[in-house]
Amino acid sequence: MNATQRTPRESRLLAYVAVGALAGAIYVLFDVVSEARIGRGTLTGPLERAHTLIDHTFPIVVGGLLGVSAHYLRLRAKLTAAEEAAARSEGLNMRLQRVERDQAVWVLVAAVLHELHNPLHALGLLLDELSATADPAQREELVARARAQSERALLHLRTLRSMRSTGEPDFVEVQLDRLLRELGDEVALLAEGEGFSVRVECEASVSARADATYVRTIVENLVGNSLRSLRGGIGDHISLRLGKDGGRAVIRVSDNGAPMVVTSAEALFEPLAGSKREGLGLGLPIARALARAMRGDLVVEDLAKKTFRLELPLETGE
């Protein structure tokens, strides 16, 4: 290995060895000269006292330095081992996150295909109703509702096209307030047609470092659950609230529909444990996996008030 290939640590070690060797050489030279003059009887005065002092103290100093060096090398070995263990742990965590996300992506594909059944079935019913009515006003309303259901189905297909099975999430700056308002506008027509509303509350402009497709998929899943809840005839609105909390971007999704029938908040995130008649019970587990793949999380903040909390890393500088 030539000098250009040495690491900074190796270069410092060589420098320390060189300085130590030079100090040792100076001591040996001084000792040889001093011993020769002692043999001739010419070493007197300050030089004699200096020789005596150095002769008596130098071994002690060298011994102390050797002890310090041994302790330093031991500490460096422990620190290096700790750094390597931390690097292995971080690598393992990243691989586990990637596995969890990739599994979520594939399950999401199956779930989205399954969820296509709902808007397509509703679209078929609306078309049947449209063919049976002659009232222009009612026909216009049915056409608007049919378009909303069609857009809902297309959203699922766009989600499928945008998902990737390998690699890391596409971390970019995502303007969450804009994303929530766009999503609120898209859902509003469908919600109004069924007798309830969507409320979007943004304290201010908030940007997260995240994957826009993942964020939208998570929020759509939560809104979809709220829509199904409100169709039971209890409640009249869905609330999307955006803010910051503890250095994180926070989206809260809630509704005032029928209460959730679960034994605990964590039970909602157990795969295939959903209580809905339709669906596979995979929406919330997938949503949480996607949130954690973005170094965020999805939790139930208030089970009684049906409030879900999505946390995401803030964009640098927020």
Image (spheres, rainbow, N blue to C red):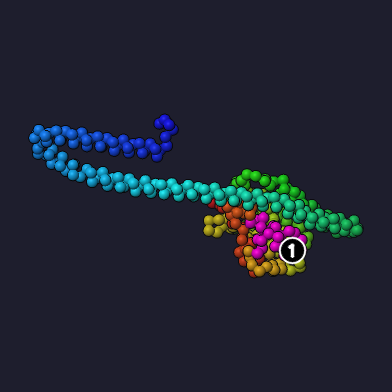
Q: Is residue 81 visible?
A: yes
Q: Nearer the viewer, residue 31 or 258?
A: 31
Q: Is residue 101 left or right of residue 87?
A: right
Q: Three-letter amino acid code at disc 1?
A: Lys
Percent from the top left, x then y, of residue 298? 62, 58
Left or right placement of residue 245 versus residue 107 in this view = left
Can you give x and y, in whole percent of width and height, for residue 127 in the image? 86, 55
Specify start and end residues of the magenta stretch as a single range.
Answer: 267-288
Residue at 66%, 69% in the rendered image: 263
For label 1, the residue is 276
Q: Residue at x 67, y 52 (%)?
A: 104
Q: Is residue 277 magenta?
A: yes
How many residues crowd mark 1 within 10 Å: few (<14), some (14–19), many (20+)? Answer: few
What residue occupies the far front of the structure in this picture?
Answer: 39
Rendered location of residue 239, percent (x, y): 67, 62
Q: Is residue 167 magenta?
A: no
Q: Residue at x 90, y 56 (%)?
A: 131
Please tell me which residue lies in front, 195 or 39. Answer: 39
Q: Secondary structure at mark 1?
A: loop
- The answer to whether residue 210 shows anywhere in this view is no
**Residue 90 image offset from top left, x and y in percent:** 53, 49
Residue drawn at (73%, 61%), measured in percent from left and top? 227
Say how many tags the image has.
1
The quadrant the N terminus occupies is: top left
